[in-house]
Amino acid sequence: MAKTNPGRFFEDYKVGQVIRHAVPRTVAEGERALYHALYPARHALYSSDEFAAASGLDGSPLDDLIAFHVVFGKTVPDVSLNAVANLGYAEGRWLKPVWPGDTLRSESEVIGVKENSNGKSGVVYVRTRGLNQMDEVVLDYVRWVMVRKGDLSAPAPETVLPALQKVVPAEDLVVPEGLDFSDYDFGLAGEPHRWGDYEIGEKIDHVDGVTIEEAEHMIATRLWQNTAKVHFDATFRDDGKRLIYGGHVISMARALSFNGLANAQMIVALNGGAHANPCFAGDTVRAWSEVLDKAETDAPGVGAIRLRLVAVKQGAAEFALKGEDGKYAPEVLLDLDYWALMPM
């Protein structure tokens, strides 16, 4: 009996299947330090205990995307070890802050499958939950991934496509208990722009760019334990290139968005997302955002802003997204739709 794990192939997934992922991980300040070393992350709520305390919290939680990467990484050996590509996200909600010292684990349910027409791969839909040491759900999201078939003669399963919300309703957003932006310090946060200063339809060029290096990508995939072969093994793809982990692009674009959105402090929902084109070492990533919606919350001084975050690589036209054919422009790497909390 083989003792090693070859990973699941498309034919191994069944709708309704629940997978408990190994291994729980206790996260600490080291994760924050490494995250801020990998990305130019500067949002004040995640950088300063004093700033967070002045905003009604017990201290500075770990960055929202640290929680996402840790929870996501746990799922890779069971969901996407044999992936061709991670395709998209929906219905993501951050339900509780993650604090230094918390222990996170992940579990996923298969909610959809569809074999591709080539018969060599298929798309698997999973709903993943991240739980802390008290079995409280801190993060819940859906993603879909293209996975190779191990046995090309395996019969195609019955297609099941989950019905997914296009947008998490504003009334379903969870504001962390105690969060209060009534006495928000815009000077320390880095920009004066508040919720009321942004208009729906407004687009913001975040100006800066970062060239992706092979070494930093490998640190990120090891740190988050995303061991998918397309990220680790240069012989896995016909072109001999390692695909940059999509979460690395997400975090880089989010960090770049600080210039123009420094006060979009907390991510509370992920409405949708697509890794539009592959990213490789040597690509220079830039970002722009579009304001899609705004909503008030019941928390004092706290508003919600819905943003489209687009990451592009060198050579992209200004605010490039899709062509006349409705397909993403080849320079577009990421199209992410999310809700964030911002002082009013």
Image: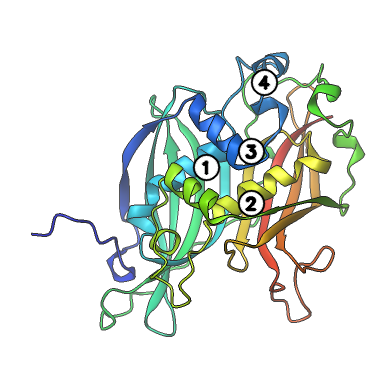
Q: Which residue is mark 3?
A: 268
Element on which disc 2 rests: strand
Q: Which residue is mark 1?
A: 68
* Label 1 vs label 2, nearer the camera: 1
Does the residue at mark 3 contact the one at mark 1 (Cβ under 8 Å)? no
Q: Which residue is mark 4?
A: 48
Disc 1 from disc 4: Cα separation: 20 Å
Does the residue at mark 1 contact the one at mark 2 (Cβ under 8 Å)? no
**Looking at the image, how many numbered discs can be counted on the residues?**
4
Return the residue nearer the eye: 105 or 162: 105
Image quadrant containing the N terminus: bottom left
- Whether residue 106 is situated above or below residue 326 in the rendered picture: above
* Label 1 vs label 4, nearer the camera: 4
* The quarter of the displayed image where residue 151 is located: bottom left
According to the image, what is the colour scheme of the structure? rainbow
Element on which disc 4 rests: loop
Q: What mark, if any, has residue 271 been given in the picture?
A: 2
N-term mark: 4 or 2 = 4
N-term mark: 3 or 1 = 1
Does the residue at mark 3 contact the one at mark 2 (Cβ under 8 Å)? no
Residue 107 placed where, x, y %? 37, 44
* The quarter of the displayed image where residue 134 is located: top left
Residue 84 placed where, x, y %? 44, 69
Does the residue at mark 1 contact the one at mark 4 (Cβ under 8 Å)? no
- Whether residue 94 is situated above or below residue 53 in the rendered picture: below
* Label 3 vs label 1, nearer the camera: 1
Q: Is residue 230 left or right of residue 194?
A: left
